[in-house]
């Protein structure tokens, strides 16, 4: 399995931790570049690596076929060979598109992830999923391509705007809800506790991915709140961020789980209360029928069936495969005031 290093200050040692000198193509975005590209390039060159860089425009629009093509062209122009490395320096957008380029350039080259957003630290930089969006939908092309090394330095999060930080908090809540009641009890956390919280989330993800790398079963637990969340993102024309969509999605699924008698009264309220404390939204801005219709277009649906993640207790979520029509009743239960 790929190596994950989580340590305050690890960024300063990134070039050394990369191993033997090689050609390194750093892919980043302009916001991240403004803070970290200079230091990263100097460190790589200082450690004997031959480093080149490409910066994309920030934002989900850059997780596109166009950027993917640009990166592949850049890797070829830079003379990258199969023994060289692509280094993704950025949030989930950069990690996903650079990762997909690494997975496919010359049939696959080494990938190092240096995540700079909370979401990327706790989620997208581990587990090996890479992707780009197509005009027809999110993440429609991609590959499983685990990073050789993921280097997580919480100090890099100090420049992340709070709205984006909050998106990552929704994923932290997700890990607590699906697997770890003790993690839930640590929320909301202080800055000094951040490294431990990230480690906890990464450990949960790695354990699940180790048992189900290709998303055939247990890994789908990581979709808690995401099926409804993606539908909400789509309905809002992507005005709603991923974290906001997931937060409302978790609230819907928790309410539904309680109302359908799957978990004890009060559990959903605890989850929703914590999301309020973290300034995450929980009210559903669309009706159940609209959400259901948007869910039908979700790529995770297999035929006339869907697998929803329901909460049996805080820290214990389970997969519920069901006919599509039954999912409508679940969403209705979760959206009712
Ligand atoms: N591969 C996976 O397993 C997986 C899992 C979850 C989400 N994702 C994907 O991740 C993406 C979202 O990731 P994200 O929330 O990190 O978004 P993002 O990469 O777009 O980053 C959010 C914003 O923060 C800025 N930023 C990032 N780090 C910064 C820093 N340290 N300082 C200043 N600005 C910084 C970026 O420039 C951007 O404007 C989506 O495309 C989603 O599909 C992938």
Image (cartoon, helix red, strand yellow):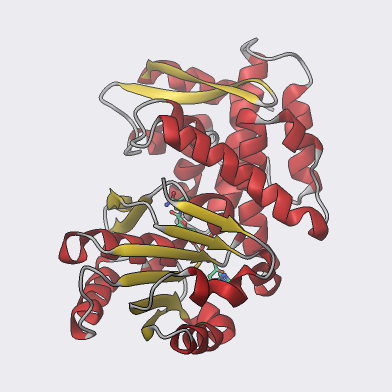
- Above or below, 279 against 263 in this view is below
Q: Is residue 269 left or right of residue 82?
A: right
- Work out which residue is located at the far top of the displayed protein and give it: 261
Closest to the observer, 48 or 98: 48
Q: Residue at x 67, y 35 (%)?
A: 176
Q: Position of residue 279 (x, y in %)?
A: 75, 51
Q: Is residue 9 left or right of residue 81?
A: right
- Above or below, 66 against 125 in this view is below
Q: Position of residue 128 (x, y in %)?
A: 38, 49
Q: Is residue 179 left or right of residue 94?
A: right
Q: Which image quarter holds the N terminus?
A: top left
**Res 10 quadrant in image:** bottom right
Q: Position of residue 141 (x, y in %)?
A: 25, 52
How many numbered callouts? 0
Q: Which image quarter holds the C terminus?
A: top right
Closest to the observer, 236 or 45: 45
Q: Position of residue 271 (x, y in %)?
A: 73, 33
Closest to the observer, 309 or 222: 222
Residue 149 appears in view? yes
- Work out which residue is located at the far front of the displayed protein and give it: 20
**Res 250 quadrant in image:** top right
- Above or below, 78 against 92 in this view is below
Closest to the observer, 280 or 193: 193
Q: Residue at x 32, y 57 (%)?
A: 133
Residue 291 appears in view? no
Q: Residue at x 30, y 66 (%)?
A: 64
Q: Residue at x 81, y 58 (%)?
A: 192
């Amino acid at each position: 399995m790929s190596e994950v290093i989580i340590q305050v200050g690890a960024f300063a040692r990134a070039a050394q931790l990369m191993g033997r000198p090689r050609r390194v193509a750093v892919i980043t975005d302009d916001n991240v570049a403004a803070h970290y590209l200079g230091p990263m390039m100097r460190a790589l060159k200082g450690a004997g690596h031959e480093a080149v860089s490409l910066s994309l425009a920030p934002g989900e629009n850059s997780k596109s076929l166009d950027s993917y093509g640009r990166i592949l062209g850049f890797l070829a122009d830079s003379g990258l060979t199969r023994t060289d490395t692509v280094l993704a320096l950025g949030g989930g957008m950069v990690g996903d598109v650079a990762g997909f380029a690494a997975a496919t350039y010359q049939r696959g080259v080494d990938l190092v992830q240096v995540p700079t957003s909370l979401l990327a630290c706790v989620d997208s930089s581990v587990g090996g999923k890479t992707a780009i969006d197509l005009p027809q939908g999110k993440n429609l092309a991609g590959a499983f391509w685990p990073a050789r090394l993921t280097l997580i330095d919480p100090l890099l999060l100090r420049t992340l705007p709070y709205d984006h930080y909050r998106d990552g908090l929704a994923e932290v809540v997700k890990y607590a809800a699906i697997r770890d009641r003790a993690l839930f009890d640590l929320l909301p956390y202080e800055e000094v506790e951040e490294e431990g919280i990230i480690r906890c989330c990464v450990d949960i993800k790695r354990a699940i991915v180790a048992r189900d790398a290709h998303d055939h079963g247990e890994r789908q637990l990581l979709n808690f709140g995401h099926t409804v969340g993606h539908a909400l993102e789509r309905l809002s024309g992507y005005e709603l961020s991923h974290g906001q969509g997931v937060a409302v999605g978790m609230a819907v699924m928790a309410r539904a789980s309680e109302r359908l008698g799957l978990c004890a009264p009060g559990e959903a309220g605890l989850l929703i209360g914590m999301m309020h404390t973290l300034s995450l939204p929980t009210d559903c801005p669309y009706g159940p029928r609209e959400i259901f219709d948007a869910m039908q277009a979700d790529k995770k649906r297999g035929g006339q069936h869907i697998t929803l993640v329901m909460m049996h207790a805080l820290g214990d979520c389970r997969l519920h495969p069901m006919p599509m029509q039954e999912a409508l009743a679940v969403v209705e239960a979760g959206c009712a005031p």
